[in-house]
Image: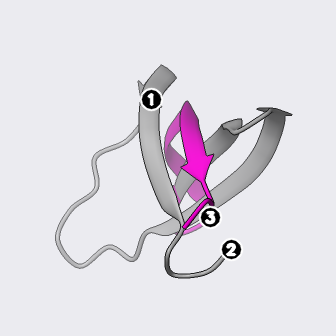
Amino acid sequence: YDMGTLVYFMSIEDAKFRKMVVQGDVVHFEVVKAHRRGPVWKFKCRAIVNGEVVAEATNTAMIDDKS
């Protein structure tokens, strides 16, 4: 996708916040495509600090690449 691609976030499901993130923590985000139906995509997302999962959720987005 190029810079003209629009992404519309539609929903956040099954969000879990497992641990507090504090100033100075380095957060790494892991995003994996789970499913696609036409322009609608589902992604499994995790936030990781020092090798520990601190948050996770399933996000749904519509990707419009008709720029």
- Name the residue carrying label 2: 1
The residue depicted at 60 percent of the width and 49 percent of the height is 63
In front here: 59 or 27?
A: 59
| Residue 40 place in picture, x, y as percent | 67, 33
Which mark is first along the chain, 1 or 2? 2
- Give the mark toward the camera: 3 or 2: 2
Residue 13: x %, y % from top left? 51, 19
Disc with the residue nearer the chain's start (3 vs 1): 1
- Which is in the foreground here, disc 2 or disc 1? 2
Q: Is residue 65 magenta?
A: yes
- Residue occupying image coordinates x 28% and y 56%: 21
Residue 19: x %, y % from top left? 37, 42
* Screen quadrant of the N terminus: bottom right
**Residue 49 in view here:** no
> Which region is colored magenta?
48-67
Secondary structure category for the residue under label 2: loop
Helix, strand, or loop for circle 3?
loop
| 3 and 2 marks in contact (CB < 8 Å) | no
Q: Which residue is mark 3?
A: 51
Is 2 positioned to the left or the right of 12 in the image? Answer: right
Q: Is residue 34 visible?
A: yes
Judge whether 15 appears above or below 42 on screen.
Answer: above
Q: Is residue 49 magenta?
A: yes
Residue type marked 2:
Tyr
Alpha carbon distance from label 3 to label 2? 30 Å
Q: Which residue is mark 1?
A: 10
